[in-house]
Image: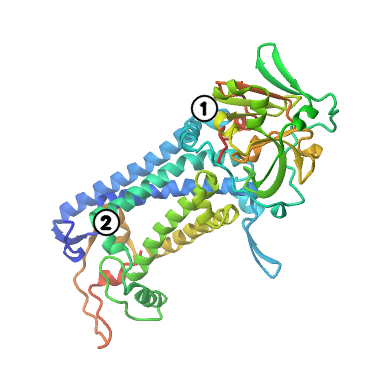
Amino acid sequence: MKKRKYTERTETLSTAAFRRRMVISFIVFLVLIGGVIFAWKWLNRQPKEDGALKPLRSTLEANEKLFKSTLDSNATSKTYTVKDAVKNVRVNGLIGIQDSIDVAKWRMNVIRGAGDTLKISFDDIKKLPKKDVIFDFKCIEGWNQVTHWAGVPLKDFMAYYHLQNFEQMQYAGLQTPDKKYYVGIDMKSFLAPQTILCYEMNGQPLPMKQGYPLRLIIPVKYGIKHLKCIGTLFFSNQKPPDYWAQRGYDYYAGF
Amino acid sequence: MKTVVKKHLLAIRWFHWINFPILGVMIWSGLLIYWAYAKYSITIANTELFHFFSPGFYKALNIPHRLAEGMSFHFTFMWLFFGNGLLYVLYTIFSGEWRYLVPNRRSFKEAWQVLLHDLHIRKYVPPQEKYNAAQRIAYTAIIIMGLGSIISGLAIYKPVEFNWCTWLCGGYTTARLVHFILTIGYCLFFLIHIVQVIITGWNNFQSMVTGIEVIHPVAVVPVAEEQPAPLTEQDTNEEA
């Protein structure tokens, strides 16, 4: 049949056989329509897990597994030059951001274990090597901006404070000092070469609304993971709580 | 007794009808995502002629503030859209049906004649096999558009891991626009498709469900000498 010409694909049916064919086909067609409507209603009736319908949440997690395992650990976001960077950097979220912060009292708390918290001052952070990252910042809402940031490469930070043992764990968790905003990040993305603990934007100290004194810049993730005003860093093999993932978004949120 | 032609193979009918609700969910969930940064418009000389889309349009479809939900649907149904499309393409290749679908050397010239005929400007259409030239171009273009949606989609979904897709689309910002324009393209395709199906009539429509189309006796039409004769009445009627 494969080789038959279209004009030769003819046959002669009795009226009864023709009618039978029509009826069967349309019954199957209507059953298919009913099945699709039923499946759609079933899907929308499913319980939600962290704000997403359970089957969809499971798919997001499967997508995460697939894309996390295929991502090259040295993968980088495209870089730009200083003149490409915008001057008016968009401010999009202020959850966990305070009006002012006494930087002399501010500490970055790195939890190494129960009752073992490393407290790092802003001056200590600034003593570490500094790296500029100019990349296309992408918001999960759909907008993007080439922006210029600078801070301590995360790998250098981990090495300087002898935290490499924690690099074997599955996730890093970050919280603002008031714990109102929090993110969880898979370790591979967290340790990506462009991740920095950032304290400068366009060559100036971070504005309050951009997370003064210290924020995360992680170019392999959507903006929701670039936590502003770091209070606490911890490591875990379970997924740390994540503000937006609890509200229906993809936990991975990575590129 | 009825003489019928086996027009649409069973698998092709399944791919066609399954694609319909899947593409519907993709477009709807895409709209939920697009709303969060709905910046596209048709603007000429600083005058905005049309904004995608108006507040009333969003309200009527209950679109606002559902970004997370849109993403969860989009990144689930993308697998069904991709899988169904891939199976369809593979099937047309291995069944040989691609011969009726892919435009040939004559198609681009003939498609113009088909268009003039459809607009009642020209009386005759070129002889065709299963699909006319305009259909061949449309049904092949829609597959290329599907591929374009996958590539531009990957370009904005995974711009680091699939940076070659982003590069191919001319960057992240352009890729988002390409993805959007292709979606508008599906909607226009759908509109024309529906109009053509209605115009062409029941015998044609039911063949997409049953697979068979009734062939009527050859219509004898007086033909001007330089014009190729239409093969059958059915041939001139098939548009959708």
Residue A181 appears left or right of A4: right
Residue identified by numbered label 2: B8
Instruction: Report whether residue A94 is seen.
Output: yes
Farthest residue, direction top = A115
Residue type, label 1: Pro
Q: Position of residue B41 (x, y in %)?
A: 63, 60
Q: Are marks 1 and 2 in contact (CB under 8 Å)?
A: no
Q: Nearest the camera: A172 or B5?
A: A172
Q: Nearest the camera: B2 or B115?
A: B115
Position of the N terminus of chain B, as image quadrant, is: bottom left
Position of the C terminus of chain B, as image quadrant, is: bottom left
C-alpha distance separating marks 1 and 2? 40 Å
Q: Position of residue B222 (x, y in %)?
A: 24, 84
**Helix, strand or loop for disc 2:** loop
Dot 2: within a 10 Å radius of its alpha carbon, few (fewer than 14), some, or many (20 or more) residues? some
Which of the labelled discs sits on residue A84, or is there none? none
**Helix, strand or loop for disc 1:** loop
Q: Position of residue B102 (x, y in %)?
A: 32, 64
Q: Position of residue B68 (x, y in %)?
A: 59, 38
Residue type, label 2: His
* Residue A40 figure quarter: top left
Instruction: Report whether residue B59 is seen.
Output: no
Residue identified by numbered label 1: A47
* Residue A2 figure quarter: bottom left
